[in-house]
Amino acid sequence: MSFQTNKSRPLIISVIGGSEPSVRAVDLAYSVGQILAQKGVVVVCGGLSGVMEAVCRGAKSSGGTTIGILPGNDAKMSNEFIDYPIMTGMGNARNIIVVKTGSAVIAIDGSYGTLSEIGHALADGIPVIGLETWELPQSTDLPTKIEHVFSSAEAVDKAIEAALVRESTR
C-alpha cells in the first residue's frame, strides 16, 4: 500500500528526535521507519545520528526512501541511510525545513532541538504525533497539541491519517 498526496506525490512524514536517544527510542524510531516504508511513505529527518539514523535505517530495511535536511554544507555528514541529503548551511535553523517538508510529524524522544521542531510544527498547524517525547502544558488559547501515542504502529497510523486530512485541505 502506498499513500499519495492529492497531487500524486508520495506522502512525506517528518520524524524528529534526539541525536543521543535511549535504546528504547532507537528501537521505536527503527520500527517507525520500517512501518512508514512498508506503507510507501517517504521519511524526512535531520539526517544525522540517533533517532534520525534509526528511523532511516528502519526505512531502508523495508525498501523506503529517506531525505535528510542537514545543518551544514557537507553531504558526508549525513547518516549512511540517507538517500537524498539536502545541505542547508543553516545549523539548527534547518529545523523549520525538517518539519515543513512533511505533511505530519512524528516526535520520538528528543531534547531542545526536538522541542523547537515541535513548536514550529504546531505553530504552522502541522499535526504532531508524540511517541515518548515532550509533554506540553494544555492551553485553551493554543489550538493545537501533540497527540501522544504508545506504539510505533499507532504513531504511523495517526501520522498518516493526520497527513492525509491536512493534504486534502490544501
Image (cartoon, rainbow, N blue to C red):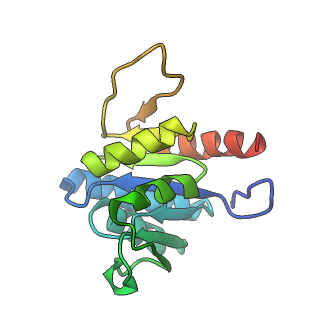
> Tag count in the figure?
0
In this view, the residue in front, 136 or 15, is: 136
Quarter containing the N terminus = bottom right
The answer to whether one can see residue 86 in this image is: yes
Please indicate whether residue 22 sits to the left or right of residue 6 in the image. left
> For residue 134, what is the image quadrant?
top left
- Quarter of the image for the C terminus: give it: top right
Give the residue at x 34% y 68%.
53
Outermost residue to the top: 140
Evaluate whether residue 151 shows in this view: no
Question: Which image quarter: residue 48?
Answer: bottom left
The correct choice, above or below, for 109 with respect to 49 in the image is: above
The residue positioned 61% from the left and 39% from the top of the image is 162
Percent coordinates x, y for residue 38 in the rendering: 57, 63
Q: Position of residue 149 (x, y in %)?
A: 42, 35
Could you say where residue 92 lies in the image, as x and y percent from the top left? 34, 60
What residue is rendered at 31% in x and 59% in y? Answer: 51
In the image shown, does 120 or 110 lie closer to the viewer? Answer: 120
Which residue shows up at 76% across the image and 39% down it? 169
Furthest residue in direction right, as rendered: 7
Q: Is residue 26 left or right of residue 89?
A: left
